[in-house]
C-alpha cells in the first residue's frame, strides 16, 4: 500500500493490518470457490471443510480489530491516516461477512444432497460464485496497490452478478411451477443465489472503500441490474 504517514511506526502497524486483510481475503476467496464446488458436486465432506474453515476467518477479523484499536489508541491518526484506518475496518467487516455467506452456502449442501436434483442449478450457482470470487480477488489486488481503475472495474462488473441472479430466480420459479416436488430444493437454491448476489454487493462496497482510501472521494451511484423483486414468471 502507498505510504500514508511520515511516522514509520504508524506505517508498520498499517502494513501489518493490510497483510492480515489480504490473508483473510484469500481465505474467503477459497471458501467461496470450495463452497460452490461442494454445492455442485454434492460433496458433504468438502462443505464441512468450508464450514470449519470459517473459524480461521473470524479469528483473523478479530486480530485485525485488535490491531486497529491499538493503532487508534497509540498513534491517534488524523485526516488521511484516519481515513485509511476507517476504510480498513469497514473492509475487514465486509470480508468476514463474505466468509459467513460462503459458510451458509456450504451448510445447505447436506440438505440439497438428499433433495431432488435440479438440473444445472449447482453449475449455474458455481458460475455466479466464480464471478464474485474473481471480483473479490481483483478488489484485494486493487486494495494492495490502491488501484482505483481496477476498483472501478470491479464495481461495474457487479451488474453481471445481478443479471445472473435474475436469470437463476426465473429458472428456479419455473422448476417449482412445473413440479411441486422441486419446491424445497429450489427455495434453497434461490436463497443461495441471493446470498451470492449479496456477496457481490459486499465486494463492490470494498472496491468503493479502495477508491475512498486512495482519493478521499466517495464513488457515485453504482450500476445495478433489474431487482429480483420485479421478476414475474407466468405459467405456460
Image (cartoon, rainbow, N blue to C red):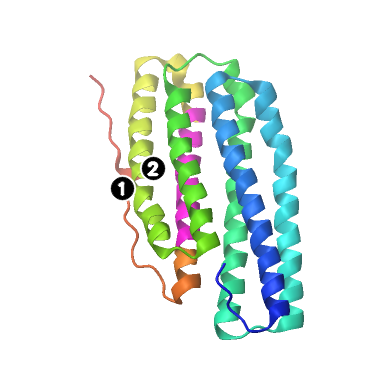
Main structural element of the magenta stretch: helix, strand or loop?
Answer: helix
Q: Which region is colored magenta?
A: 188-207
Crowdedness near tag 1: few (<14), some (14–19) or many (≥20) residues, C-alpha within 10 Å = some
At numbered mark 2, what does the secondary structure look like: helix, strand or loop? Answer: helix
In which quadrant of the rendered view does residue 7 lie? Answer: bottom right
Front residue (pair 232, 63): 63
In terms of sequence position, does the residue under pointer 2 or pointer 1 come before the other? 2
Circle 1 sits on which residue?
A: 225
Where residue 149 sits: x, y (%)? 38, 61
Mark 1 secondary-structure assignment: loop
In this view, 36 is above or below 183? below
Question: Where's the N terminus, which quadrant?
Answer: bottom right
User: Where's residue 117, x and y in %?
Assistant: 49, 14
Relative side of 145 to 46, left or right? left
Contact between labelled residues 1 and 2, with CB atoms less than 8 Å apart: yes
Report the Cα–Cα distance between label 2 and label 1.
Answer: 8 Å
Q: Residue at x 74, y 67 (%)?
A: 67
Amino acid at each position: 500500500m502507498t505510504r500514508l504517514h511520515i511516522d514509520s511506526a504508524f506505517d508498520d502497524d498499517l502494513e501489518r493490518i493490510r497483510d492480515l486483510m489480504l490473508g483473510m481475503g484469500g481465505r474467503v476467496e477459497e471458501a467461496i470457490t470450495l463452497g460452490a464446488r461442494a454445492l455442485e458436486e454434492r460433496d458433504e465432506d468438502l462443505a464441512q471443510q468450508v464450514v470449519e474453515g470459517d473459524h480461521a476467518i473470524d479469528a483473523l477479523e478479530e486480530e485485525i480489530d485488535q490491531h486497529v484499536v491499538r493503532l487508534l489508541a497509540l498513534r491517534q491518526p488524523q485526516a488521511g491516516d484516519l481515513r485509511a484506518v476507517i476504510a480498513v475496518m469497514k473492509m475487514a467487516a465486509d470480508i468476514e461477512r463474505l466468509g459467513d455467506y460462503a459458510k451458509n452456502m456450504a451448510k445447505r449442501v447436506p440438505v440439497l444432497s438428499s433433495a431432488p436434483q435440479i438440473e444445472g442449478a449447482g453449475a449455474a450457482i458455481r458460475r455466479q460464485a466464480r464471478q464474485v470470487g474473481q471480483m473479490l480477488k481483483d478488489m484485494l489486488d486493487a486494495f494492495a496497490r490502491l488501484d482505483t481503475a481496477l476498483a472501478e472495474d470491479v464495481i461495474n462488473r457487479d451488474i453481471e452478478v445481478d443479471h445472473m441472479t435474475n436469470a437463476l430466480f426465473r429458472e428456479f420459479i419455473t422448476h417449482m411451477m412445473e413440479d411441486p416436488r422441486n419446491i424445497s430444493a429450489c427455495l434453497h437454491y434461490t436463497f443461495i443465489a441471493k446470498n451470492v448476489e449479496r456477496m457481490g454487493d459486499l465486494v463492490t462496497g470494498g472496491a468503493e472503500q479502495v477508491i475512498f482510501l486512495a482519493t478521499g472521494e466517495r464513488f457515485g451511484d453504482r450500476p445495478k441490474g433489474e431487482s429480483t423483486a420485479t421478476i414475474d414468471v407466468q405459467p405456460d
